[in-house]
Amino acid sequence: MKKYVLQWSDEFDQDGLPNLEKWSYDLGSRKWGNGEIQYYTEGLNSIIKNSILNIEGRIENYEDSPYTSARLTTYEKKHFMYGRLEVSAKIPTAKGSWPAIWMLPVEKKEKDVPWPKCGEIDIMEHVTHLFDTIHVSLHTELFNHVARTQRTHFEHLEGITQDFHEFAFDWSKDEIEFFIDKKSFAKYSRFDEGYTTDETGWPYDKPYYLILNQAIGGTWGGEVKESDYPSPFLIDYVRYYEIIEE
């Protein structure tokens, strides 16, 4: 039996900018490798109001980019290794929006370990050309979307964009299990048949940091419809639990 003990959270209870004791910003454009057209700003596209964080995509020329958005991370604020992460979010519906809740290892920044060798955990991704579908994925050196070998799952859910939903995952030494609204829908093991058990196939035994962002356009976000913007990506809470096996 599992016991979940809350260790860290942000309920976004203070109006204004995100708490800089908990969040950092990734900044810039044209460097993310997916052909996206937004510029990630610092504090201009992320605002808290009525206990909701809004990561907003907007049409505006900024630093030679036609759109702006935000990419918040917990890097150097809070790092995670095993446990459960829960994020309650309302997905944007603007055509071309590409919201994501995901994780990268700390060593990618600190040791400049290249992607996909470093590893990646995607807790939620959504694109509007697959409107009622949530995507989760694990990327590794041998198993990644460039090679089209990643472990991935597309969960079709009618109306998933219409309200807040909780996207979560349980992470242990040898397993990662994904949930929507407390219901498990995808589970992966270090020992799944056809995969390697070393770092090339399971780089999930080290600290990671959380990323919340809304990309716009690009190789997967696709065609953008300007009249759909501004595009709100709303976050109600982020909660991290230690998992104790009893």
Image: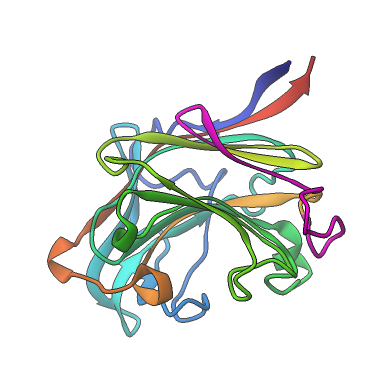
> x, y percentage for residue 231?
24, 57
Residue found at the very far right of the displayed protein: 198
Q: Give me the residue at 76% from left, 37% from top.
A: 172
Q: In this view, does 158 lie above or below 223?
A: above
**Going 72% across and 74% down the picture, which residue do you hit?**
114
Question: Overall secondary structure of the magenta stretch?
Answer: loop
Q: Which of 236 and 151 is in front in this view?
A: 151
Give residue 158's position: percent from left, percent from top. 29, 41
x then y, percent, for residue 223: 27, 74
Q: Position of residue 211 (x, y in %)?
A: 54, 54
Viewer-proximal residue among 192 and 93:
192
Which residue is more in the foreground, 96 or 107?
96
Q: Residue sitting at 36 percent across and 73 percent down?
A: 38
Q: Between residues 82 and 153, which one lies in front from this camera angle? A: 153
Q: In which quarter of the image is the C terminus?
A: top right
The magenta segment: 179-203
Q: Quadrant of the N terminus?
A: top right
